[in-house]
Image (cartoon, rainbow, N blue to C red):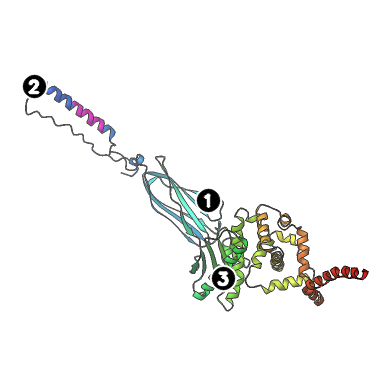
């Protein structure tokens, strides 16, 4: 017979043994009969209360309400598909299964109803097509199941997690102080990894000293061996690639640094730049990060590069000399996709942040971030944090870029001494006049 049908069995009732060998008188037989009747009544009631074995195995679980998860797992091919698999058994028929999964940064979990044939044992799988619905790369994916039975019972499994890495490559890694650098196997040895880790640790420490934000507990840096491979990875996951990527919500920075001569110079530019975005995100809180204007976010990242980018200085000098600087208000929003315009936008933003540091110090930077985190407008944040209008700040910054004639530079250097000399004259002249009148 099938598992879903009843299974017959023989149910045997054994009556109490009555001794008929020795005769007894009537007075003796009455209590005995009463005892036998009482015992029979107890056995009859017991038979009613004890569950009958003459029932289907699945249905017998109604009272027990047990569901056992035999296996729950997930496997994936990067940017192609994820396969979720569940094996479970129950003493009551399993009639419905739901899958829930959520990637880091997603606002809510995705839910799917998995159709099953009612059975006490199930083996189901679901394939999620990443080409149609990509997930953030290098993030954590959390998943769990809900299993419903014919008895009306429901089991929600414990959440499981896996790291969604680019498994097209094998990765080496090195960690210290909560920071882990990953690089493609064969594209750099221990010295390569140690250099990246040292730069990441030093950068994080110095940047946090200025921002005074929460110290990151986990920070990952993934280093691709070429721009092509990084660009392909980002395109496959629905992301655009510039010169590096920071995913603040994931605590992940992704850069392209080939294992060639001069790789340390690239590390000193790219790694601090992307780490800055991660730490700004933590400093202002995830919900307020979107309020930080682009010029401040990218300006901090550019100014924090441990080795200046020569192209930025050249672009800034040329635009300033030709009076073709971008209006700073245009830098409040994401930069233009035009490479030439974007280069100038990065150069101007970095220069503006350095100007603010020199004039207002680290406190000026922190005040700006705090005001913007509270939702201030691009221009309003400058007014509130620095007590200067947005246009006034731009004017002062542009003036600082103007080349000075040699005599102006000389005057600037000796200006304090000239000032003291003039002050002494102002004090001495009245005194001399008084002496002459005498």
Q: Residues within 10 Å of mark 2 (few under 14, many from 20)?
A: few
Q: How many angstroms separate mark 1 from mark 2 (CA)?
A: 82 Å
Asked whether disc 1 touches disc 3, contact meaning CB atoms under 8 Å apart, the reply is no
Q: Sequence-wise, which precedes: disc 1 or disc 3?
A: 1
Q: Nearer the viewer, residue 328 or 437?
A: 437
> The residue tagged with tag 3: helix, strand or loop?
helix
Q: Position of residue 39 (x, y in %)?
A: 19, 29
Disc assigned to residue 110: 1
The reply to whether residue 14 is visible in this rendering is yes
- Earlier residue among tags 2 and 3: 2
Q: Is residue 164 magenta?
A: no
What residue is disc 3 on?
A: 199
Going by the image, does 12 lie left or right of 407?
left
Front position among marks 2 and 3: 3
Q: Residues within 10 Å of mark 3 (few under 14, many from 20)?
A: some
Q: Nearer the viewer, residue 357 or 281?
A: 357
Question: Which is closer to the viewer, label 1 or label 2?
Answer: 2
In this view, 184 is above or below 54: below
Start and end of the magenta stretch? 37-46
Residue 361: x and y in percent read 68, 64
Q: Which residue is painted at 66% across and 63% down in the image?
A: 362
Residue under pointer 2:
25
Assign a secondary structure to mark 2. Answer: loop
Q: Quadrant of residue 403?
A: bottom right
Residue sticking out furthest to the right: 437
* Main SS class of the magenta portion in the image: helix
| Kind of element beneath mark 1 | strand
């Amino acid at each position: 017979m099938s598992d879903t049908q009843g299974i017959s069995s023989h149910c045997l009732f054994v009556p109490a043994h009555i001794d008929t060998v020795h005769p007894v008188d009537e007075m003796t037989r009455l209590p005995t009969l009463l005892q036998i009747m009482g015992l029979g009544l107890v056995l009859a009631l017991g038979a009613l209360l004890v569950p009958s074995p003459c029932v289907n195995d699945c249905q017998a679980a109604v009272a027990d309400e047990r569901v056992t998860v035999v296996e729950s797992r997930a496997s994936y091919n990067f940017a192609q598909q994820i396969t979720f698999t569940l094996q479970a058994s129950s003493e009551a028929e399993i009639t419905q299964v739901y899958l829930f999964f959520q990637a880091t940064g997603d606002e809510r979990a995705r839910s799917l109803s998995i159709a099953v044939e009612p059975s006490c044992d199930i083996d189901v799988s679901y394939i999620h097509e990443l080409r149609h619905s990509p997930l953030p790369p290098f993030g954590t994916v959390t998943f769990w199941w809900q299993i419903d039975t014919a008895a009306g019972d429901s089991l929600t499994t414990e959440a499981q997690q896996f790291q969604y890495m680019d498994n097209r490559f094998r990765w080496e890694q090195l960690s210290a102080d909560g920071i882990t650098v990953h690089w493609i196997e064969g594209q750099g040895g221990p010295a390569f990894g140690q250099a990246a880790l040292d730069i990441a640790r030093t950068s994080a420490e110095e940047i946090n000293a200025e921002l005074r934000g929460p110290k990151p507990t986990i920070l990952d840096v993934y280093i691709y061996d070429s721009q092509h491979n990084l660009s392909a990875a980002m395109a496959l996951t629905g992301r655009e690639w510039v010169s590096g990527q920071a995913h603040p919500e994931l605590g992940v920075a992704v850069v392209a640094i080939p294992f060639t001569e001069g790789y340390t110079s690239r590390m000193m530019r790219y790694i601090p730049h992307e780490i800055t975005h991660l730490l700004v995100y933590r400093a202002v809180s995830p919900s307020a990060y979107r309020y930080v204007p682009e010029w401040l976010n990218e300006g901090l990242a550019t100014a924090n590069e441990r080795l200046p980018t020569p192209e930025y200085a050249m672009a800034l000098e040329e635009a300033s000399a030709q009076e073709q600087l971008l209006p700073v208000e245009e830098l409040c929003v994401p930069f233009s996709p035009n490479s030439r315009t974007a280069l100038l936008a990065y150069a101007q933003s970095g220069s503006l942040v350095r100007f603010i540091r020199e004039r207002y110090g680290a406190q000026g930077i922190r005040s700006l971030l705090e005001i913007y985190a509270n939702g201030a407008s691009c221009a309003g944040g400058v007014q509130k944090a620095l007590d200067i209008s947005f246009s006034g700040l731009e004017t002062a910054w542009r003036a600082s870029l103007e080349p000075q004639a040699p005599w102006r530079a000389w005057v600037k250097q000796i200006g304090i001494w000239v000032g003291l000399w003039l002050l002494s004259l102002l004090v001495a002249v009245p005194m001399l006049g008084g002496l002459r009148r005498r």
